[in-house]
Every structure is written in C-alpha cells, then in structure tokens.
Image (cartoon, grey):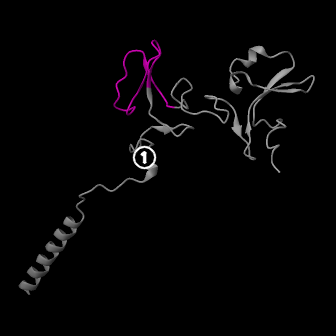
C-alpha cells in the first residue's frame, strides 16, 4: 500500500510539474484590439482623427502655446504653465491637418452626398431666394460671415434646406 501511495504522489507531482511547464509563456499573448489605442498601447489614450491619423495626448503650454505629444497622462510630468489636452481638442493644430474635403480645401466643409456628388456650402439670400456658391478660397467658409449682406445666410452642404443635396440622384 505504501508503494502505491508513493507512486500516486510521484505521478501527481510529475503531472503538476508538467502542467506548470506547459503554462509557461515564451511569447506574450496578443491583447484584444479593443484594449489597444491606435498607437498599439494597452489602454492608451491615442485616437484617430477623421483622416485616420493617430494622435497622442498633448501637453499644451498656455503661455508660449507650445504643444508636445506625451506618451501617457499618468507618469508624464508637466512643465510650468502646461496642461494636458486631448488629441481632438479644438486648439490642436495637428487634428485633421492632413485631410482635404472633396473640393480639396484643407479643413473645408464640402462633402460627398448620397449620389456621389461633391456638395459645397453656399450663400442663400432669404429676400431674393437666390443661392450663390461660395467659390472664394475654394469653398472655404472662413471669413465669409463678415462679407454677408443683410438677409444672407451660409447654408452648409448637409443642411436640411439645401436643395442641391442629393439632387443628382436618378
């Protein structure tokens, strides 16, 4: 009986040793994609903009307006006059910087409608009901507000009242 118990104990120890050696990881198991940010950092804070460019959080100096990317917001030490800013912060000049709209205007408002037509913004005269396409600066609406006459408004491409939106569909 004693040899059977010793044999069972020896087999159990061998089995445990085999299990522990089999569980040893030589290569790390890849993390699920939902745990990685766009830079491949586990639980990272980097996000992609509309141009599919990946951006890290930044440290923004509110005195000098200098911006620098940071690897994380936990261990990073901020300098004097710095604060963290998310990548999609409106003050981040790199966010969507490599995009052009369908009229090739950097950060423009023109978009493709459901018919595949590029639709830009236009000025609509609410008195005469005449639309005028915004052609200055390639369709860019920056600075247009200052040139509007009384009764004129800017209509963006996807506005519900835009008669040109999806007008090319057959």
What's the residue at 10%, 85% (across, down)?
4
Residue linked to disc 1: 36
Task: Please state if 37 lies on the left or on the right of 156 as rendered.
Answer: left
| Extreme-top residue of the structure | 63
Residue 4 versus residue 40: which sits nearer the camera?
40
Residue drawn 42% across the image and 15% down it: 81
Question: Considering only vertical position in the picture, is 165 above or below 137?
Answer: below
Mark 1 crowd level (few <14, some 14–19, many ≥20, 10 Å Cα)? some
In the rendered image, the vertical position of residue 78 relative to residue 8, given as above or below: above
Magenta region, residue range: 59-87
Mark 1 falls on what kind of element? loop
Please name the residue shown 14% across and 72% down the image: 13
Residue 23: x percent and y percent? Answer: 24, 64
Query: Magenta stretch: residue 75 in it?
Result: yes
Residue 44 highlighted magenta (yes or no): no
Residue in the image at 16% along x and 75% along y: 12
Q: Check the picture and name the quadrant holding the N terminus.
A: bottom left
Classify residue 138 by image quadrant: top right
Percent x, y for residue 34? 46, 50
């Amino acid at each position: 009986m004693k040899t059977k118990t010793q044999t069972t104990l020896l087999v159990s120890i061998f089995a445990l040793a085999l299990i522990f050696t089999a569980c040893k990881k030589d290569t790390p198991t890849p993390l699920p994609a939902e745990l990685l940010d766009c830079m491949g950092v586990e639980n990272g804070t980097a996000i992609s903009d509309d141009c599919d460019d990946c951006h890290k959080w930044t440290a923004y100096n509110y005195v000098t307006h200098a911006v620098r990317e940071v690897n994380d917001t936990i261990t990073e030490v901020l300098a004097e006059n710095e604060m963290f800013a998310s990548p999609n912060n409106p003050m981040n000049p790199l966010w969507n910087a490599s995009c052009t709209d369908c009229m090739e205007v950097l950060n423009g408002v023109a978009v493709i409608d459901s018919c595949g037509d590029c639709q830009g913004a236009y000025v609509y005269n609410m008195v005469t009901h005449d639309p005028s396409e915004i052609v200055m600066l390639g369709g860019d609406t920056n600075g247009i507000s200052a040139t509007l006459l009384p009764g004129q408004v800017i209509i963006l491409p996807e506005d519900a009242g835009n008669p040109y939106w999806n007008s090319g569909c057959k």
